[in-house]
Amino acid sequence: MYEFGGETVIVTGSTTGIGYGIAKAFADTGADVVVNSRTESAVEETAAELSNVGEGSVLGVTADLSRSDEIEQLVDRAVDEFGRVDALVNNAAVWPAEDSMVDASLEEWETTMNVNVRAQYYASKLVAEHMTDRGMRGSIVNLSSQTGDRRTGNRGLYGVSKTAVNGLTWRMAHDLAREGIRMNAVSTDVTDSRQLRHEASQVAAEQPERTTGDVLEEWGRERPLGRLGQPDDIADAVLFLCSNAASYVTGTILRVSGGGNLQ
């Protein structure tokens, strides 16, 4: 449905799960794709895999997005390799070990906010400056979560970081619109990923009669649409927001959650 041949897309946190699905979807459309994580072996393996997917090229850049200098290196490498960045997908995120806002440490707060919020802001700022300097009308998509909408429940610190991502999207989209740069977000719920499978395996470990697959299936059935989200579901939304079909869409949080946002 989409054609991104000749365009360059950076997808952060893109060696597994949702990020990998997004990077692969862009590769399928012929885009030049920059994949990233903080683990060099994973980056190299992913870049090699996706190089065989589409007609574009794939560049792997190892970068820890909690460090501003490594975010700079990520963007610089993309520009040096491909000469331009047409779209940025801010997917990289961490899950704090402690759910409770009372019990979480200040260190956990700083790590979570640095990766989940500050990195999205700084990468967006650098890419937006690149686009503006070249008179480009590009697109930026942030990955958010239904936890950012909820006022209670678990995942408190993670939820606060995603609430901040929603605010970042609204505020920065307004500032970028005058430059012709569109910023939007995709808000997810339970989606098949490494982190979700880890959580499901922990639940299954406490209930020997159930498998990880059983837990995931149950979580999917609890959603109004009756199934677990897949990386392709999220990738479809990201491709739309980065395409010309969404040329009049900015500052929007598109909820791709199987109806989880209604609960």
Image (cartoon, rainbow, N blue to C red):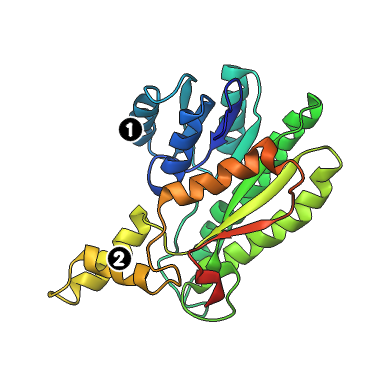
x, y percentage for residue 156?
A: 52, 74
**What amino acid is at disc 1?**
Ser
- Tell us which disc is closer to us: 2 or 1: 2
Crowd rating for badge 2 (residues with CA inside 10 Å; few <14, some 14–19, many 20+)? many
Res. 220 image quadrant: bottom left
256 up-or-down from 130: above or below: below
In the figure, 190 relative to 29: above or below? below
Q: Is residue 133 left or right of residue 47?
A: right
Q: Front-most of 31 and 163?
A: 31
Q: What residue appears at the point 57 percent right and 40 percent down from the top-left corner?
A: 239
Picture coordinates of residue 11 (x, y %)?
53, 38
In which quarter of the view is residue 247 placed? Answer: top right
Q: Is residue 66 something one can see in this rendering? A: no
Task: Name the one closer to the observer, 10 or 26.
Answer: 26
Residue 235 vs residue 69: left or right?
A: left
4 relative to 35 in the view: left or right: right
- Residue ID for mark 1: 41
Q: Quadrant of the N terminus?
A: top right
Which structural element holds mark 2? helix
The answer to whether 182 is drawn above or below residue 78 in the figure is: below
Residue 4 visible, this angle: yes
Hey, what amino acid is under mark 2? Answer: Leu
Report whether 223 appears left or right of 69.
Answer: left
- The residue that appears at 40% across and 66% down in the rendered structure is 97
**Labelled disc at residue 114:** none
